Amino acid sequence: MAIAQFVVNGLLVGALFAAVAVGFALIWGVVDIINLAHGEMVMLGGYTAYWLLSIATGTAEGSVLLFLATIPVVVGVLFVVGYALQRTLVSRVIGTDIFLTLLVTFGISIAIQQLAIQAWTANPRSIQVAFADPSMAVGGLVVPKMKLVAFAGAIVLTAILYLFLQRTRTGRAIRAVSQNPEAAALVGIDVEHTRAVTFGISSAVAGGAGAFIATILNIQPQMGLIYTLKSFVIVVFGGVGSIPGALTGGLLLGVVEELTAGLVSSQWTLAVSFTLLIVLLVIKPKGLFGTGADNEH
Amino acid sequence: MTDTHNRRTFLKVAGGTGALGLTGLAGCAGNSSDGGGGGSGESGDTITLGGSMSLTGDNADLGRLYKDAYQETIDRINESGGVEAGDGNTYELEMVLRDDGTDASTSRSIYQELIDREGIDYLLGPYSSSVTLPASAVAAENEKPMVEGGGASPEIFSQGNEWIFGLLPTANKYAKSYIDMALAQDPTPESIAILAEDGTFSQSTAEGARNKIEQTDLELVVDQTFPSGTSDLSTNLGRVRDQGADVLLLCAHQKHNIILANQMESQGVNVDAAMGTVGSLNESFKGEVGANGDYLYGPTSWDINANFEDPVYGGTQDFVSAIEDNYDYTPDYHSAAGEAVIMTFVNAFQSVDELTPTAVRNAIRDSDPFSTVYGDVSFDDSGVIAKNMLIRQWQPDPGLQTVYPSSVAQSDPIYPMPDWSER
Amino acid sequence: MSTDPDTSGLLRSILPPERLDRLFDLCGAHGWKLIAAGAVVGALPPVFGLREGYMMTVLSEMFLFAILALSWDIVGGQTGYPSFGNMAFFGIGGYATAILVKDAAISFPIAMVGAVVAVLVFAAVNGLIVLRLRGHYFAIATLGILLAIQQVTRNLDITGGASGKILFDVPPGIVFYYFFLAVLVVEMAVVYYLTQTRFGFILNAIRDDEGKATAMGFNTTYYKTAAWMLAALFTGLAGGAYGLFNTFLDPQTAYNGAWNVELIAMALMGGTGTVAGPVIGAFGLHTIIEYVESSFVGWQLVLLGAAIIVTVIRFPKGVVGTLRAYANEMDYYERGGMAATDDEEVTTDE
């Protein structure tokens, strides 16, 4: 197969990784937490979209527009979930031993996964979006339409997040808290609320990505871990707290994985991703664009 | 520094004694509803069958099929008076089923607990080869016969273990019937592609397929393994399309079958026949993929349309109705295999002179073929059932149809599969 | 456990801080004897008839988890480097013995030596990589290594790929019971000894403030690596035995993700940075998990997740740490009003 096809495949799916990773990067940069439950937000987003469609149409099938209509709802729901998690649980361990913060989000991740299994069974689910002709050929390359829609959706979500941070008051408050929480408090920013909002919007974007993932791959309760891990790789590459970094990193990771699968063998894709993580941590922990989290505890 | 250690060491001893105390408590408390202590497996007039099953986790849906089949069969036997054993007594049957969550690391302790504390002599095997392997080792060490309908990996039976009996054809046979079927069609396929998940069972199936392919004229044009954690088959499907494979074999489980169906559609990958080895024939699969699942094949070890005679249900169709009526779903080969597990024990109990594990094991091994809803059951020297897979296909109008071998087929396979653009 | 009267009122009436403190002092004076006593107590059950079966498996697994938790604590609790990838050592040890015993037909004891060598080499190599990182990055890097090793193992033929290795002719259960008990006792003795020496002091200094420790002239790299290798050694020993104990090893069992979390939770709940804490945490949590698994089918991991959350938020010092803080309440008055409640700051010896 042409390398171009691999690259295209990689970019298409990489955008989704990126959309998941930007939230992760944001939380890490602003709240100084590595959110090990981030992948579960993706999973919850996927299920929310799935159930919305099932309730609306009776089955998990629908037209593109109907599916896209669920995205704002998904975003809203996941925002609330993220906000609540931060406010009730995560806030209690901020500033303590990093080990404790890692564990709390890990515990949340396990709890959510298992509750999802109890509630929805471990059966994988997928959303069928109807197209008359599901894929298009562009210059000899096959591009499934839904993947293109997902790609666009991921980019849009990322862009909205970025603009939000740059242009709105809350966005500026978030950036202020990430730079210096004490100073931010001194100028009247409600630091707790701001952190919770950060968690909320990060989860919301991840959830949106999850909805798209439900259409082109599938969702099941334990899918989250892989996305959390990929987010690590991406954020370490792109830099903590950096959205452009996460976007670049996501697209690159997608391409690297597809090239590995295409040129070497799909057996090694995960091994390559994880090795990449280690290599990046060693040679360039501050990342491409980011300020890099402190190396001190 | 010394102050710190005073405290630490105090707690060491407290911990040590406490731990032993706790384990004592755990011992008493760790039992399930069957009441504490190690009762004997056949106290009074009851024989208890015990084992574990995937009641939660990834395979919970399939585990449930076994559990329901076991329960239904045991209830029926008890209602009609129990089992008349060869030693002259009549026994009621009881079942203890633990949850292993398809986690091989719990398998050992679960089965040991059943043997030591529940006093169970007759073991029901778990689902999934990776859990069955350590479980079968426990059975052998304790010399208790184990009959299972859920572990198909050939390694289970190649260890020289004389206490394990399996009701599924071994994994390497799963693809054999499919390839035979494809070769019998017109136009005859020339090339075949294998995509295999990197799990124990899927790799065994792929290996079996490769061996079979070598004996035919088919050319193996794609042979790829993918990590079971990934859910994107696009690149591999692209290979399949580029190589122009006529036949596609996916060695994986339900999750990947769903992706296969969907991604073949979205990428316009056309083959003459495609099959997934597990999970492509159940209703939840079809429910998720809808029309994308049409024309896909899947293997089954059970001819659901036959009417094999069975002492408990009467015949296969009675079994199907019983499950449909009581549990609201149509049974598949997992359910039927579950029934056959119970019947294997029952058949052995009826033929022994004395009810001991060794005698029962010998009875199972030496038994003549006996009929159950699942078909005829008899075991070869390594404990595997003598059976081959049948092939079923999702056909748009009538639904799931058995299409191979022709002696039991309900209809001919629709071959080749229509192109996506024509559907 | 806070010091406000409402929550600890009951405890106070039964066991006031001063009495607990004196109890600690008493036992501390006899530290080595306590370890020996524990070893004897542990060795007794088989003598009194427990030769095989379920109980033996449960106890053996308890010792095993205690080894894992304590090993984690050497690097995590004592040195302040929380590793999320200790199971990598476990798996490598396990596969090493499995391959040596099954494919090379080497006997169990010699295979164990081979496993130890393999694990130490691996630890040295990956220690070079990860010990340069701090905090979050260290944790993630260790997790990355664990996952990478797991994937690689799945893809190699020598390890049996995803099918793993089946070992049928293994020593009887009682051998493993004593093996795990012996390794645990030795490890407790080693850790206890080290914490009473300069070695332990420096590890704790690294944990508390690595910059300062380096500035004081300690060769932190040496000490970190030594702690890392020690943890790897014991974890690898446990893993090496486990493969045979379980008669079956596959990538999922050898690099068990659930255990990876459980061992950290055990150290945490028992009390990090102590000798007894991880052991108590291991015994207690393992017992609870076994019980939950048989009674509340399917809910064990939810409860584990919830337990972790609760412990982290309410009792971050774990059982031992919290009891110790409680016992130290009276320190203020005992030491004539010096404002110190944390032992480490008060210590003047060494």
Image: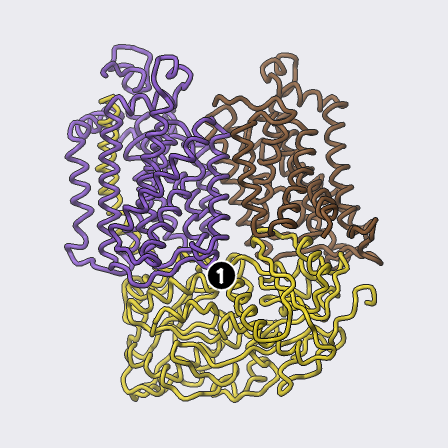
Q: Position of residue C168 (x, y in %)?
A: 32, 63
Q: Position of residue B95 (x, y in %)?
A: 40, 71
Q: Residue at x 27, y 46 (%)?
A: C113
What type is the residue that disc 1 sits on?
Thr
Q: Position of residue B411 (x, y in %)?
A: 70, 83
The front one of B31 and C270 is C270
Q: Chain of mark 1?
A: B
Q: Which chain is yellow?
A: B
Is B170 situated above or below C297?
below
Q: Give the color of chain C as drawn.
A: purple
Q: How many marks?
A: 1
Picture quadrant where residue B323 is located: bottom right
Q: Position of residue C24 (x, y in %)?
A: 22, 28
The C terminus of chain B - image quarter: bottom right
Is B8 situated above or below C241?
above
**Residue to which mark 1 is pinned:** B200
The N terminus of chain B - image quarter: top left
Asked if one can make out residue C293 in the rendered structure from this viewpoint, the answer is: yes
Picture quadrant where residue C128 is located: top left
Q: Which chain is brown?
A: A
The front one of A92 and C242 is C242
Q: Is residue C24 left or right of residue C308?
A: left
The front one of C17 and A82 is A82
